[in-house]
Image (cartoon, grey):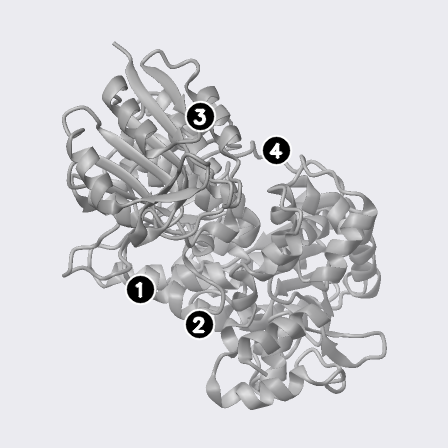
């Protein structure tokens, strides 16, 4: 026997006309193939229409779309089609009579949480809106809610799908989310003795993987987990660092998307260190790494099994998602794990088979011509937010063509702060393809010496040098200096990293770990060619002209994280993508390290200046140095230090009230 869904709509002529007809067509489309439901409409609803339809239809679910007025009631229409509030006390009386038939009421109207709380005294499930909700968000919620309901999901899981859809697709509306009442209790309420922001799962990811991470967060939310995803939970102006640490400390466990790009992120590295510390406190916290395909040498996978999502095709995603659910319960997944429920699927991750761009080839050619071919050790440095993986791969490809694949070594030390020296160098030996019994710095160095003494030319790329245990890093630096001194013509050394790597050269003078590596080169800023190649490879359904791409670059000042935010807004179809980016949480994140009251006056002074002095890789003034490495400053063509863009200056002034 089919259940009746009764849809009411009211759009009084003196109120803004909501797109209720479109919303109802969307609901009809979602339920068209569902045999369990019969949909009936009542448009231009008056109070008497509401009463008579409820008496006649014996509905299982009642849906109201239109406008709410909080404590004054729901807005219906009078005989002239004008707004007339249905008093909350009358609404209460009507639905008290429906307690034996109606199982769910959906109030898809602004300020309807008051009415939801009233009806929840009589109806098992009631959904209301906390505040003013935009028409687009109302439709997104309704579409996913009824689509899930038609697919056989329960009311609670359908609600979770709708709420997740609003968060994912309506960035400007995420503060005003629906509220579900179950048997009179708002499900968003926390018990009084629990922290107000307690999470089941913290998701750690690099910004470039946000779409994939959001899809995962939606799927986990539908399974009943409360998720911390920074894009969902942190609002503009909030202290980003403090919010991340607070959320991790109030999470039961964490999921880390441990891709090569994440391994190169300072933020992800910081989150990893916090996770390790929490796990060692023996308070039940644990974390689970996720990978995409084979990635055996990730610094985040020390003695830890990962869940492999491969290229995220549907079959592989369902298997991996079931494995993840088992891991979250700390259970074995069984012989044939497979999740057969409703899932939102991410885009399939296509392997990166493209050739290096002209810009990358030019950069790599210059690096070889000026440094590598002359056996000059060099550091390749990147400001915050740059993806260095493309350049690292291009360097290895060039070196393999020049010296042969067997002569190209790539090491990235363990990220664990507690790795012993033998564990550290055993990992490096494995990455180099050396014998498995190597477990000390001198044994690793001895193997390198044997190959160099035989006349081999070796190309050694080091990434992530600044991560991991300090004592082992000091040992590695010493061995590298010795090898350079003895076999400088045969050993071609490139070390790639960011601010912390540069600090190891500049901060301690003659005692610097990297004092023997005198040369350095900065990665170039994002350009139009980058947008045409690897940036838009992640946004394949986003056709942009070169003029539009230039608009993005000009707006962002070529800042990589702002570029990503703009592309995401454009992909969501937001015509005013500039406003969407500026009102999101990213602007506050850019200045997260610069909110100290003691620095405010100095920072406001810098924000007022066009010229900040002579450009240096390591500015002597600490605040300027941090601004530069946070990628807010650049060196211009005249060799002067300046702000990356006027937009970034405006963001800083607004946040600091300069």
Residue 553 spot, x, y in % from top left: 74, 57
Q: Report the Cα–Cα distance between label 2 and label 4.
A: 37 Å
Left or right of 384 on screen, residue 113: left
Q: In which quarter of the image is the C terminus?
A: bottom right
Mark 2 or 4: in front is 4
Q: Residue furthest front?
A: 80
Q: What element carries label 4?
A: loop
Query: Mark 4 vs mark 3: which is more N-terminal?
Result: 3
Residue 657 spot, x, y in % from top left: 55, 81
The residue that mark 1 highlights is 277
Q: Report the Cα–Cα distance between label 3 and label 1.
A: 48 Å
Mark 4 or 3: in front is 3
User: From this viewpoint, is residue 58 visible?
Assistant: no
The residue that mark 4 highlights is 350
Q: Report the Cα–Cα distance between label 1 and label 4.
A: 35 Å
Q: Quadrant of residue 509?
A: bottom right
Q: Tell me the number on the disc at residue 27.
A: 3
Query: Mark 3 vs mark 1: which is more N-terminal?
Result: 3
Q: Report the Cα–Cα distance between label 1 and label 2.
A: 16 Å
Residue 176 spot, x, y in % from top left: 41, 52
């Amino acid at each position: 026997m089919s259940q009746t869904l009764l849809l009411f709509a009211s759009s009084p002529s003196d109120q803004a006309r909501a797109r209720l007809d479109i919303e109802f067509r969307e609901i009809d489309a979602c339920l068209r193939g569902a045999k369990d439901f019969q949909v009936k409409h009542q448009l231009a609803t008056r109070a008497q229409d509401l009463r008579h339809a409820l008496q006649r239809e014996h509905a299982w679910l009642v849906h109201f779309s239109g406008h709410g007025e909080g404590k004054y009631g729901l807005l219906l229409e009078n005989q002239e089609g004008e707004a007339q509030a249905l008093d909350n006390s009358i609404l209460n009386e009507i639905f008290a009579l429906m307690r034996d038939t109606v199982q769910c009421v959906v109030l898809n109207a602004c300020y309807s949480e008051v009415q939801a709380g009233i009806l929840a005294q009589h109806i098992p499930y009631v959904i209301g809106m906390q505040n003013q909700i935009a028409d687009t968000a109302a439709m997104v919620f309704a579409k996913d809610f009824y689509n899930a309901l038609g697919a056989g999901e329960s009311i609670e899981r359908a609600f979770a799908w709708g709420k997740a859809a609003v968060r994912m697709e309506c960035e400007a509306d995420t503060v005003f989310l629906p509220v579900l009442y179950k048997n009179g209790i708002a499900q968003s309420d926390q018990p009084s003795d629990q922290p107000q922001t307690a999470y089941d799962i913290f998701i750690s990811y690099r910004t470039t993987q946000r779409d994939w991470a959001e899809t995962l967060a939606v799927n986990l939310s539908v399974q009943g987990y409360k998720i911390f995803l920074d894009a969902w939970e942190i609002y503009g102006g909030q202290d980003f660092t403090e919010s991340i640490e607070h959320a991790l400390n109030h999470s039961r466990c964490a999921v880390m998307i441990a891709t090569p790009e994440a391994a190169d992120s300072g933020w992800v590295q910081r989150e990893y260190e916090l996770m390790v510390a929490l796990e060692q406190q023996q308070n039940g916290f644990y974390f689970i790494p996720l990978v995409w395909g084979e990635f055996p040498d990730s610094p985040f996978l020390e003695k830890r099994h990962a869940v492999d999502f491969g290229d995220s095709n549907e079959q592989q995603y369902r298997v991996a998602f079931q494995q993840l659910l088992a891991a979250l319960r700390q259970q074995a997944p069984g012989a044939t794990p497979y999740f057969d429920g409703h899932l939102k699927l991410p885009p399939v991750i296509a392997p990166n088979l493209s050739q290096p761009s002209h810009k990358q080839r030019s950069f790599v050619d210059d690096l070889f011509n000026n440094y590598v071919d002359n056996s000059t050790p060099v550091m390749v440095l990147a400001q915050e937010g740059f993806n260095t993986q493309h350049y690292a791969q291009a360097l290895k490809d060039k070196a393999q063509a020049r010296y042969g694949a067997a002569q190209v070594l790539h090491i990235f030390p363990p990220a664990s702060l507690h790795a012993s020296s033998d564990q550290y160098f055993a990992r490096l030996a494995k990455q180099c393809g050396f014998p498995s019994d190597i477990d000390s710095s001198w044994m690793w160095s001895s193997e390198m010496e044997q190959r160099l003494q035989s006349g081999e030319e070796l190309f050694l790329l080091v990434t992530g040098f600044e991560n991991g245990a300090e004592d082992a890093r000091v040992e590695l630096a010493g061995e590298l200096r010795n090898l350079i001194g003895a076999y400088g013509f045969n050993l071609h050394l490139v070390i790639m990293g960011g601010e912390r790597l540069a600090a190891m050269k500049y901060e301690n003078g003659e005692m610097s770990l990297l004092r023997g590596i005198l040369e350095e080169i900065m990665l170039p800023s994002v350009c139009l060619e980058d947008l045409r190649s690897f940036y838009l490879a992640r946004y394949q359904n986003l056709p942009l002209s070169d003029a539009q791409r230039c608009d993005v670059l000009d707006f962002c000042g070529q800042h990589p994280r702002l570029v990503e935010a703009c592309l995401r807004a454009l992909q969501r179809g937001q015509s005013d993508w500039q406003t969407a980016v500026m009102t999101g949480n990213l602007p506050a994140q850019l200045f997260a390290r610069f909110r100290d009251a003691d620095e405010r006056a100095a920072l406001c002074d810098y924000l007022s200046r066009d010229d900040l002095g002579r450009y240096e890789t390591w500015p002597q003034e600490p605040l300027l140095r941090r601004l530069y490495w946070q990628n807010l400053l650049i060196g211009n063509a005249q060799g002067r230090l300046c702000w990356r863009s006027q937009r970034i200056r405006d963001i800083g002034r607004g946040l600091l009230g300069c």
